[in-house]
Amino acid sequence: MKSMAWLVLLAVVSGAQAGEEESTPCDNVETDQQSFDCAAFNKQIAERELKSAYDDLIQRMRDQYGDEAGLESQIESAEKVWRQLRDADCKVETHTEQPGSKTFQSAWNSCIAQRSDERSEYLRSLDSQDRDEPAPED
């Protein structure tokens, strides 16, 4: 019985280590192509996290407020304006690169990833702000 428990423990530990050891295109970046691949990977991950943070916020607001005062519509509008600002900022940030080049695309992807990460953090913080505020007294 003891040996069976050790096998189960070993399998769990091995599975956890395998999850930690997954490689990404950002491991050991040494070439321009690897930098390009890493920037694309980071953009993809950041946009996925942004969508998740946005969807979570919409769901939290629906659960907490319903559609009180068109809150969902306000969030959608804010997100649309934010995306326009993000894209404009990234155009400024990448203005020295030749559009269509790998250098441009890497810089663009890195900018989008960075801004998306920042926005995800902000969207997630909205929930914590709501929970930290004391309930209004009647």
Image (cartoon, rainbow, N blue to C red):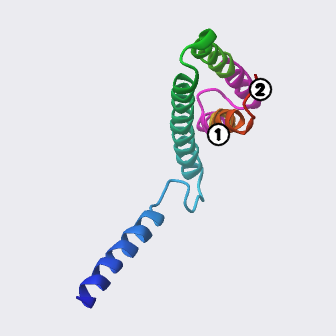
- Position of residue 105 relative to residue 17, above or below, is above
Which residue is located at x 54 percent, y 41 percent? 40
SS of the residue under disc 1: helix
Which residue is located at x 71 percent, y 28 percent? 90
Q: Is residue 138 left or right of residue 27?
A: right
Q: Is residue 24 left or right of residue 3?
A: right
Q: Is residue 51 left or right of residue 83?
A: left
- The amino acid type of the residue labelled 2 equals Glu
Q: Position of residue 116 (x, y in %)?
A: 63, 34
Q: Nearer the viewer, residue 45 or 4?
A: 4
Would residue 132 be counted in the magenta stretch? no
Packing grade of label 2 (10 A; few <14, some 14-19, many >=20) is: few
Circles 2 and 1: CB distance less than 8 Å? no
Which residue is located at x 72 percent, y 39 percent? 132
Q: Position of residue 26 (x, y in %)?
A: 56, 55
Would residue 105 be counted in the magenta stretch? yes
Question: Which of pointers 2 and 1 indicates the residue nearer the eye?
Answer: 2
- The amino acid type of the residue labelled 1 equals Asp
- The residue wearing badge 2 is 137
Q: Residue furthest top?
A: 69
- The residue wearing badge 1 is 117
The image quarter in which residue 31 lies: bottom right
Identify the mark nearer the N-term, 2 or 1.
Answer: 1
- Magenta-colored segment: predominant secondary structure: helix
Q: Position of residue 24 (x, y in %)?
A: 49, 55
Tell me where the magenta segment starts and ends, as one range: 84-109
